[in-house]
Image (cartoon, helix red, strand yellow):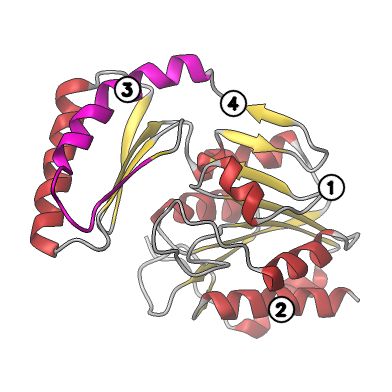
Amino acid sequence: MQGLLHGPESIRLRLSQAKRLSLFLDYDGTLADFAATPDEICPNPALIELLSRLVQQPNLRLALVSGRRLDQVRQLLPIPGMLLAGTYGVEILTGTGEHINRLDFDQVRPVLEAIKPAWQALLVNRQGFFLEDKGWSLALHARFAENGEAEQVLSTARQEVSNLATNPDFRLLGGHKFLEFSPILADKGQTVRYLLESYPYQGALPVCLGDDDKDERAFEVVQNSGGIAILVSSSPRTTLANLRLESTRAARGWLAGLLDEST
């Protein structure tokens, strides 16, 4: 399903009419370019300053929902008052500093441990692959692998999950040269819905910025709540978003514009 894309002016009008904004932001590919490896932590001082100023605005509330682990997100964005959700929302640090795990780690981990050795064995002596253990999920990255080999390895990794994992509370997430085995609750759509219901912001217009298929699930929830979805992508594609921004730089500029309008 393709969303109805609107011009910047119509979006600006809706924003200007809103008394408050509730912003749901992705990080990698949306606010910042992708790092060389998922474990690379390179805080962006200019981005931290921008979001810190936005958090201080009385008519804005910010939440970051990332596929990264929460401890990584905290290092990237050490911003008091900003809600941070890691592993697609399984682990949350609220704006008041409360740490919430929405699942029991001791029940999640044994399921992952059944898969991890098989995935590790697949990558022995292979170049361009990276197995990321997020604690709550396992992600297999093949962005720098040769296309044919990446397709073969990811296909075998899927089959390993089918052979070893029978827990209905887990699933596989796909993507471009990417595979992740995670709890079903690790879902941006479910997380945005949970945040809207658990931390209501009376009269606020929900706005979501994201760049990939995981964010599309959040786009749907935000739109069903009467909000605005914004895709960050250098090229047009099928999306539920109302607006497309060309780059992470454009996304940061768009957020800076909100700051200008609120001062």
Q: Which residue is the site of mark 3?
A: 113
The amino acid marked with disc number 1 is Gln
Q: For the residues marked 3 and 4, what is the alpha-carbon distance in whole angstroms?
A: 20 Å
The amino acid marked with disc number 2 is Arg
Circle 3 Cα neighbour tier, 10 Å, few/some/many (<14 / 14–19 / ≥20): few
Residue lying farthest to the front in this orientation: 125
Q: Tell which of 26 and 73 is nearer to you.
A: 73
Q: Tell which of 126 and 2 is nearer to you.
A: 126
Q: Nearer the viewer, mark 3 or mark 4?
A: 3
Q: Nearer the viewer, mark 2 or mark 3?
A: 3
Residue 69, position in %: x, y?
A: 53, 42
Residue 177 figure quarter: bottom left
Dot label at residue 12: 2
For the point 83% across and 80% down, which residue is it? 260
**What range is drawn magenta here?**
105-132
Give left or right: position of 154 versus 168. Answer: left
Residue 192 appears in the picture as rendered: no
Q: Earlier in the sequence, mark 4 or mark 1?
A: 4
Q: Earlier in the sequence, mark 2 or mark 3?
A: 2
Q: Tell which of 118 and 232 is nearer to you.
A: 118
Residue 37, position in %: x, y?
A: 39, 57
Mark 2: secondary structure: helix
Q: For the residues marked 2 and 3, what is the alpha-carbon distance in whole angstroms?
A: 48 Å
Q: Which residue is the site of mark 4?
A: 102
Mark 3: secondary structure: helix
